[in-house]
Amino acid sequence: MKIVKEEIEKIRELLNTIEKSDKETDSDSVKKTFDLFELPQIIKDITDFLQPSVTPYGMVIYWYMFRNSIVETGDVYIRASNAKIAKGIGTKFAGLEKQSARFGEGAVTDNLRLLDSIGAIKKVGDTNRDGTLYRIFLPEEIEICKEKMKLQEKESLPIIDPKKELDYYNIKENKFKIFERDEYKCYKCGKQLTRFSATLDHINPVSKGGDNSYDNLVTCCLHDNSNRRATPISDFLA
């Protein structure tokens, strides 16, 4: 029996050593770069991307753990018991005294489980008299937040119409797209042209605000292009 106890103690010591080693490596990295973090942006990301996916009580717990780890020390780890969390929430948030039953240890356990299930926190060590060791994750590390971030980034990107944005007059490859669209025929006289004899004409002249977009250019023979000059295309065709 004594031998078994000694072996168990050795295993516990080994696990504690491994836990401490992992914690220090990760923690040191965070502490070295924490001054580079933009805390207002992190808080905004938490509010925008994490909070909508978590119960109100779950978010109160996350904010408590976030405040007492990353904000307080720059450390992504926090060791806390359910009782300590429940007490901390009860004393930190006004108006919850009458709802203390809701913030009992059982409610804390349920919400910690929820936070763990979505990757907002993770239990990384054994429980001792000071509580359980948790790793706190930021939105940029949480999968559901990353998906929302990608979606928002995609939605915020300007919609670009290549036909309007690209230069189809000066860029050789784009010129050919206009010629091919018009089947290498002059829009005025209908003459069949080649890549060597075809030119481009602006429907709305550059002098009057026209651009080099796909829809403002037509294939034209050199003769008609020279004769038109800045005449409105409707008048020229007439």
Image (cartoon, grey):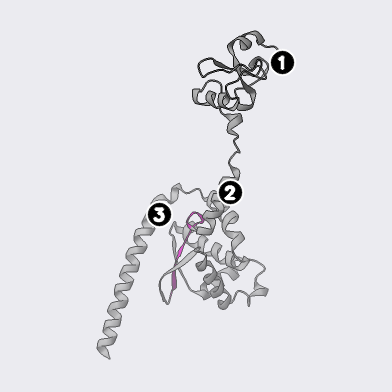
Rendering quarter of residue 49: bottom right
Q: Earlier in the sequence, mark 2 or mark 3?
A: 3
Q: How far apart are labels 2 and 3 at the CA level? A: 29 Å
Q: Earlier in the sequence, mark 2 or mark 1?
A: 2
Q: Is residue 26 left or right of residue 90?
A: left
Circle nearer the viewer, 2 or 1: 1
Q: Which mark is residue 237?
A: 1
Q: Nearer the viewer, residue 167 or 60?
A: 167
Rendering quarter of residue 162: top right
Residue 4, given in percent of the width and then of the height, sits at 27, 87
Q: Is residue 192 left or right of residue 121?
A: right
| Element carrying mark 3 | helix
Q: Which mark is residue 31?
A: 3
Residue 45, given in percent of the width and then of the height, sits at 56, 53
Q: Residue at x 54, y 23 (%)?
A: 175
Q: Is residue 28 left or right of residue 83?
A: left
Q: Does residue 192 show up?
A: yes
Circle nearer the viewer, 2 or 3: 2
The quadrant of the image that shows the C terminus is top right
Q: Amino acid at mark 1?
A: Leu
Q: Which mark is residue 152?
A: 2
Q: Is residue 69 above or below residue 237?
A: below
Circle nearer the viewer, 3 or 1: 1
Magenta part of the chain:
130-141
Q: Residue at x 65, y 70 (%)?
A: 96
Please tell me how crowded label 1 is: few (under 14), some (14-19), or many (20+) other residues with Cα within 10 Å. few
Q: Nearer the viewer, residue 144 or 172?
A: 172
Q: Earlier in the sequence, mark 3 or mark 1?
A: 3
Whether residue 227 appears in magenta in the rendering, the answer is no
Contact between marks 2 and 3 (CB within 8 A): the answer is no
Residue 107, given in percent of the width and then of the height, sits at 58, 75
Residue 199, given in percent of the width and then of the height, sits at 57, 16
